[in-house]
Image (spheres, rainbow, N blue to C red):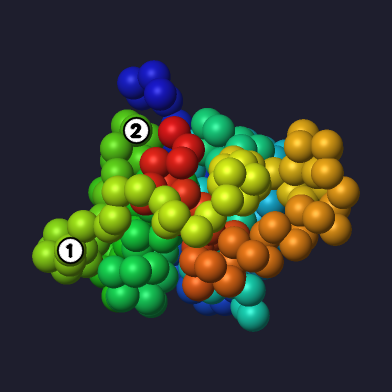
Amino acid sequence: MAAGSTIRIVLADDHVVVRHGLKMVLDQEADFEVIAEAGDVAETLRKVRAIRPDVLVLDLNLGSESSLDSIPTLRADSPGTAIVVLTMQNEPGFARQALQAGASGYVLKESADDELVEAVRAATRGETYLNPRLGARLASEPPAPSGPPGDLTDRELEVLRLIALGNTNTEIAEQLFLSVRTVETHRAHIQRKLGRTSRAELVAYALEHRLVG
C-alpha cells in the first residue's frame, strides 16, 4: 500500500453495538476509513467481493455461523484484502486455525482498544499480528507432525489439496473427472480419518502438513 493512502476497512460482527464501538476505535486514525459493515457470513462475502477493501475485521462467530470456514473463500475472492479476526475465543487452537486458513491477525475483543489498530496496520504491511498471550501459548505447544497420515490414499490427498485451495465439491469433481457423489464420499473418508469435519479444519490440516503452498 502506498504511503499516505487511506486504509479501507469492512467491519463484520453480528452485534450492531459492537460494530459501532469498533468503528469509533478505528475512526480515531486519520488514515482509516470504515466503508461498510456486515452482520453475517453471506453479507460479509457479498460486500468483500463488491468492495475489495484493504482490511476485513472479522468476528469469528457471526450469529449461529462460524466465519472460519469463509476465510479461504474470502482470500480467494479478494486476494488484496487482509483479514483480521476479532473474537472472544482465547484458545490457541482457534488462533492457529484462523491464521492457517489465511487470516493476517488474531485479536481478542477484550484487548481491541489496544490491539486492533496495531493489527490492522500490520495486516496492511503484509505482516501477521497475534495477541501476545496467545502467541506465547502457541509457542509452548509441541510442533505439528510434518507429514500426512499413511492411511490417506493418493486420491484422498488430491481431494484434500483441492478443498484447501477453496474448491467446491462440484469444482473438484470437474477437475478430477469424478462424480460429485464420489467427491462427497472421498471427503467423508478424509474427515473420518483425520477427525476433522469443517472446511477450516481441513484447510488447517493441509497447511500444517504442507500439502498446499
Q: Quadrant of residue 149?
A: bottom left
The amino acid marked with disc number 1 is Pro
Quadrant location of the C terminus in the rendered image: top left
Residue name at image x 85 percent, y 58 percent: 181
Q: Nearer the viewer, residue 84 or 179?
A: 179
Q: Quadrant of residue 175?
A: top right
Residue 112 falls left or right of residue 201: left
Q: Nearer the viewer, residue 191 or 163?
A: 191
Residue name at image x 41 percent, y 51 percent: 148
Residue 213 drawn above or below residue 48: above
Dot 1: few (<14), some (14–19), or many (≥20) neighbours within 10 Å?
A: few
Asked whether the viewer can see residue 1, the reply is yes
Q: Mark on residue 73?
A: none
Measured from the top left, where is residue 146 in percent x and y?
30, 48
The amino acid marked with disc number 2 is Gly
Residue 29 falls left or right of residue 135: right
Q: Nearer the viewer, residue 93 or 189?
A: 189
Residue name at image x 65 percent, y 38 percent: 77
Sooner in the amino-acid sequence: mark 2 or mark 1? 2
Quadrant location of the N terminus in the rendered image: top left
Q: CA distance from mark 2 to mark 1?
A: 27 Å
Q: Mark on residue 142?
A: 1
Dot 2: few (<14), some (14–19), or many (≥20) neighbours within 10 Å?
A: few
Q: Mark on residue 126?
A: 2
Measured from the top left, where is residue 124 in percent x and y?
37, 35
